[in-house]
Image (cartoon, helix red, strand yellow):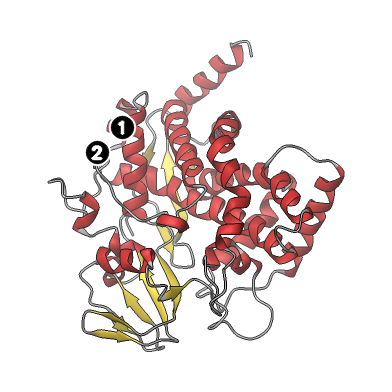
């Protein structure tokens, strides 16, 4: 498997795939136009609320996050989406990037130095760096102790690798740990994202289940999707002989932004979203009846010519780190656009700059396995890279001699 080989049949990344009904009775749409029609949802024909198609009984706390609700409820009343989003949107808009940039850089350098100190000149980007970094950043945001890093990683893997939302494990132990974390923060408050959530909970602006949904939703979105984007960035740049180009533009913020957007578009870690159909809907020759589940495929829409915004440039089936404009939907759209998108982009730019500077001659080990899996997030387990160990040690030593 190459980095550009994805773990699903090709039709799920092809915008020309006709809408269809699968053997389980679920429906699928792929083109940019169809996906954008659903995302705009002007007639309120579709709902992200999974309750109509989930099994009876308890469900995973992530399904109480704002990605599973709408501004309208299924009974016609006002939904919870806007209220939930407004709790944290000011923090993300005004403070997330400003307060987290030095933290992200510190965590990034710390992990890169660990890799250099191992002395091997090679590492598994997925296991040793990408998912560890994204998780450590989100742990700082949500109050999770770094001592629980491995345990929370196991919980996230259970979630990300579930074959469907119906099959998600309940993870009662994670719920119990989050309540312990909340109790500790109530005793010793800070001025971080978790405190914003707790304040809203204390003021009855969010419920118990919504508080847990927030924490788990931020943890999994901030760790799994961002971590996979880290891996996609280096692996795709390596496969398509663009690492030297990336090294040449490390001081060009506009160029780095274009690289990050192309990585998001081409890789699309969160490939699809199931929605409940409220009214009979027509997609080409396919009628999707009310009461059905409709999967919108971001991964396919992101290969549609429409992402080029009418500008003549390379085919969307090609990985082009200089593509612009780049109208992908990897982070959602409109009211459901990912609140943490700018933070994730910042993390990727910092990692690119620090890793390509501190790990000289970084390259993909093409003779070793590259392994992806399909799940709620299409992640990576194996991505082997090598670098010049001696030159990297010299950089670490030089840093150590520079006064703090």
x, y percent for residue 401:
60, 11
Label 2 packing within 10 angstroms: few (<14), some (14-19), many (20+): some
Q: From what the image shows, is residue 84 above or below residue 241?
A: below
x, y percent for residue 379:
46, 59
Nearest to the observer: residue 17 or residue 279: 279
Nearest to the observer: residue 281 or residue 135: 281
Which residue is under mark 1? 255
Q: Residue furthest right?
A: 187
* Residue 7 visible (yes or no): no
Report whether 106 appears left or right of 319. right
SS for dot 2: loop
Q: Are marks 2 and 1 in contact (CB under 8 Å)?
A: yes
Which quadrant of the figure contains the N terminus?
bottom left
Q: Residue furthest left?
A: 312
Q: From what the image shows, is residue 379 above or below residue 280?
A: above
Q: Residue at x 24, y 44 (%)?
A: 320
> Which labelled disc corresponds to residue 322?
2
Q: From what the image shows, is residue 119 above or below residue 178?
A: above
Which quadrant of the figure contains the C terminus?
top right
Q: Residue at x 21, y 49 (%)?
A: 309
Nearest to the observer: residue 34 or residue 369: 34
* Residue 211 visible (yes or no): yes
x, y percent for residue 209:
71, 66
x, y percent for residue 40:
37, 63
Report whether 204 appears left or right of 300. right
Nearest to the observer: residue 307 or residue 6: 307
Mark 2 or mark 1: which comes first in sequence?
Answer: 1
SS for dot 1: helix
Report whether 33 appears left or right of 278. left
């Amino acid at each position: 498997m190459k980095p550009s080989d994805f773990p699903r049949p090709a039709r799920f990344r092809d915008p020309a795939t006709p809408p269809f009904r699968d053997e389980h009775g679920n429906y699928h749409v792929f083109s940019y136009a169809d996906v954008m029609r659903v995302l705009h949802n002007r007639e309120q024909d579709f709902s992200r609320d999974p309750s109509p198609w989930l099994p009876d009984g308890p469900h995973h706390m992530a399904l109480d996050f704002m990605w599973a609700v709408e501004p309208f409820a299924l009974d016609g009343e006002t939904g919870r989406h806007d209220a939930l989003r407004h709790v944290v949107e000011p923090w993300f808009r005004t403070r997330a990037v400003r307060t987290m940039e030095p933290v992200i850089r510190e965590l990034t350098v710390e992990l890169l130095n660990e890799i250099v100190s191992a002395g091997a000149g090679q590492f598994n980007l997925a296991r040793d760096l990408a998912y560890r970094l994204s998780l450590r950043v989100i742990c700082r945001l949500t109050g999770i102790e770094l001592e629980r890093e491995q345990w929370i990683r196991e919980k996230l893997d259970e979630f990300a690798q579930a074959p469907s939302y119906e099959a998600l494990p309940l993870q009662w132990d994670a719920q119990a740990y989050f309540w312990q974390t909340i109790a500790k923060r109530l005793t010793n408050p800070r001025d971080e994202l978790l405190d914003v959530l707790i304040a809203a909970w204390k003021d009855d602006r969010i419920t118990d289940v919504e508080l847990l949904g927030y924490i788990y939703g931020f943890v999994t979105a901030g760790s799994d999707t961002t971590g996979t984007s880290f891996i996609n960035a280096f692996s795709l740049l390596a496969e398509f002989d663009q690492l030297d180009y990336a090294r040449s533009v490390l001081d060009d913020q506009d160029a780095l932004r274009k690289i990050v957007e192309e990585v998001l578009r081409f890789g699309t870690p969160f490939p699809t979203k199931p929605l409940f159909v409220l009214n009979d809907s027509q997609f080409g020759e396919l009628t999707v009846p009310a009461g059905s589940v409709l999967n919108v495929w971001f991964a396919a829409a992101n290969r549609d010519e429409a992402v080029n915004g009418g500008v003549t440039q390379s085919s969307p089936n090609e990985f082009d780190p200089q593509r612009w404009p780049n109208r992908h939907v990897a982070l959602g759209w409109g009211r459901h656009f990912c609140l943490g998108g700018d933070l994730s982009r910042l993390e990727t730019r910092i990692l690119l700059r620090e890793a390509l500077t501190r790990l000289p001659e970084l390259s993909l080990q093409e003779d070793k396995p590259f392994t992806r899996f399909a799940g709620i997030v299409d992640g990576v387990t194996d991505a082997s890279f090598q670098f010049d160990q001696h030159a990297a040690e010299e950089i670490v030593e030089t840093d150590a001699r520079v006064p703090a």
